[in-house]
Amino acid sequence: MRVLVVSDVHANLDALEAVLRDARTGGVLDAVWSLGDCVGYGPLPGECLSRLSDESAASVAGNHERAATGAISVDDFNPDARASALWTADRLEGDEKALLDAMPETRIEAEYFSLVHGTLRRPIWEYLYSVEAGAAHLALQQTPFGFCGHTHVPAIASLDADAPGGCDFRRLADGQSVSLDPGTKVVINPGSVGQPRDGDPRASYAVYDSETQSVTLRRVEYDIGSTQRLMEKAGLPRWLIERLSEGR
C-alpha cells in the first residue's frame, strides 16, 4: 500500500498537481490523506477541493476550512489571512462549503494512523513546533503513528524516554525516510504543498509505504509564477504572493 500524505495545499492547484504527478512516479497510489487547509491563501480553492475529491482523499479540517464556511470567526487571523479567508468564502459554492463542513477534525486511517491538522490537544489551532507540544500530542494519540500539518514545516516528533521532555523533535529533509516501529509512537508533519515555510519554496509531501513500513519526505518544483499571477489577478494580499517564491 502506497499512501500520498499532503497538508496545507492552500488553494494552490499547480503545486497539488505537481505533487500528484511526482508521487505517482514511484508507483500506484492506493490512497490520499489530506491533513487540512486545502483552501485559504491561494487562488483556486474550489478547484483544489474538487481535485482532492477526485482522488477520494480522506481529509480532516483545518482552521481555513472552518473559516471558509463561517464555522469559526476570522477575528484571530492576521490581516492577510483574514482577507484571504473572506475572499475564499465569497468564492465557494454551497455544496463546496458543505463538503468542508463535513470534514472531521480528527480521523483514523488504515487502523494505525491518526490524522489531524494541528495537534490532538487543539485539532485546528495548535502548532506542533516544540517538544512540549509533541509530547502532549503523543500522549493523546491512541495509534502508534500519526500525521499532522499546520506548521508548513516538515518534521517528526517521537516518544523517547531519554530525550528532554520525553520527546524527540526534529526537522525532516527532502528524501529522508523514517522507519516505522509500532513500539515507538510518532507523529509526522509532511510540510506544506501550497505554501512551504521552511525556506524551500518547493512543494512538500510524504509517502507512506506499507511494504517497507516507512514514510519518505519529498519535495517537488512547480510553476510558482503561474500561481502568483492568478493571485495577483484575484487581488489577494501582496505578502501571500511574494512568500511563495521565498518559501516563508
Image: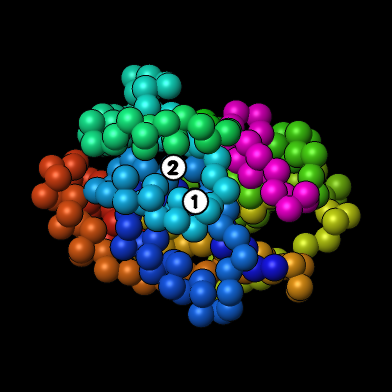
Mark toward the start of the polypeptide (1 vs 2): 1
Q: Are marks 1 and 2 in contact (CB under 8 Å)?
A: yes
The quarter of the picture where residue 216 lies is bottom right
Identify the amino acid type marked 2: Asp
Up-down relation of residue 41 to residue 145 (above or below)? above
Q: Position of residue 215 (x, y in %)?
A: 67, 65
Is residue 236 at all visible to an observer of this figure? yes
Up-down relation of residue 48 to residue 40 (above or below)? below
In the picture of the structure, the residue carrying the numbered disc 1 is 7
Mark 2 surroundings within 10 Å by alpha-carbon count, few (fewer than 14), some (14 through 19), many (20 or more): many
Q: Position of residue 117 (x, y in %)?
A: 55, 40
174 and 144: which is toward the camera: 144
Mark 1 surroundings within 10 Å by alpha-carbon count, few (fewer than 14), some (14 through 19), many (20 or more): many
Identify the amino acid type marked 1: Ser
Is residue 248 at all visible to an observer of this figure? no
- Determine which of the numbered discs, if any, sits on residue 37 in the image: 2
**Label 1 vs label 2: CA separation?**
7 Å
Name the image quarter holding the N terminus.
bottom right
Q: Which residues are magenta?
A: 106-123
Q: Residue at x 56, y 79 (%)?
A: 26
Is residue 239 inside the magenta stretch?
no
Is residue 119 inside the magenta stretch?
yes
Up-down relation of residue 72 to residue 2 (above or below)? above
